Image (cartoon, rainbow, N blue to C red):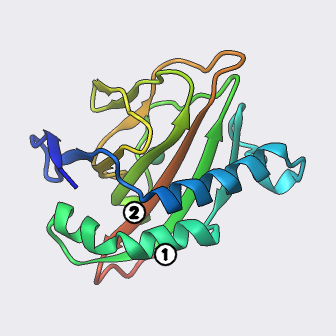
Amino acid sequence: MKQEILDDSHEINISKIPDFLSDNLMSELKEVISYIESSDDPMFKDNRFDGRKMTVDPQILKKIQFLYQEKAEEVFGIKLKPSFTILAMYSEKGNMYDHYDRDMCKYMINISIDSNCEWGLKINDKIYNLNNNEAIFMSGTYHQHGRVGELNKGQFVHNVFIYYVEEDFSGPLW
Ligand SMILES: [Fe+2]
């Protein structure tokens, strides 16, 4: 796994690792995604955002969070504990304004699973285009982040967010 530092001008570096998840995990994730895509269950609808389906802490993501914790500790250079995870599936009208996350999102791995378009990830005014199975290591609380523009009809982006906090963090984890 080759880590590339994209920005080291903040307290927490922004870095990326291509080809991050194993083939097995990627295919397991894609099975979950296609199930959610075909499901009308309102539990997957995100009422806060148009064009977004999501689920919090599915088993597959808790597994990834556990399996890659050591890697995250190596990249961030600090002992961590898991907080929560999100699988987010964006389609037509999908959007994400610039924002900061809550405390339990301090250490984040943002993994692009699948997409059929480029959808710039804006972090502190720099725009990054992510390849499938590329992981961005960043901070949800230190780095302002959002997406550039809105997805059009027929476009999709599937993303995974894995969050950790410092080992001695005592606030809520969700
Ligand atoms: Fe966020």
Question: Residue at image x 88%, y 53%?
Answer: 41
Amino acid type at mark 1 = Pro
Along the line of sight, which residue is nearer the eye, 83 or 160? 160
What residue is drawn where x is 53% and y is 72%?
A: 62
Contact (Cβ within 8 Å) of mark 1 with mark 2: yes
Give whichever of 9, 25 is nearer the camera.
Answer: 25
- Which residue was labeled with disc 1? 172
Location of the N terminus (image quadrant)? bottom left
> Badge 1, how many Cα within 10 Å: few under 14, some, many 20+?
few
Return the disc, 1 or 2, that comes first in the chain's sequence. Answer: 2
What secondary structure is found at the residue carrying circle 1? loop
Quarter of the figure with residue 4: top left
Residue 19 in the image: x percent, y percent? 34, 47
Q: Position of residue 66 (x, y in %)?
A: 42, 76
Q: Is residue 154 above or below residue 105?
A: above
Using the numbered discs, state the Cα–Cα distance from disc 1 to disc 2 in whole angstroms: 8 Å
Residue 169 in sight in this render: yes
Residue name at image x 51 percent, y 51 percent: 160
Q: Is residue 71 left or right of residue 30?
A: left
Tag 2: Cα neighbours inside 10 Å, few (<14), some, or many (≥20)? some
| Residue located farthest toward the left when viewing the structure as drawn | 9
Position of 151 with respect to 109 (left or right) is: right
Q: Which mark is residue 103?
A: 2
Type of the residue with mark 2: Asp
Residue 83 position in % (x across, y down): 46, 72
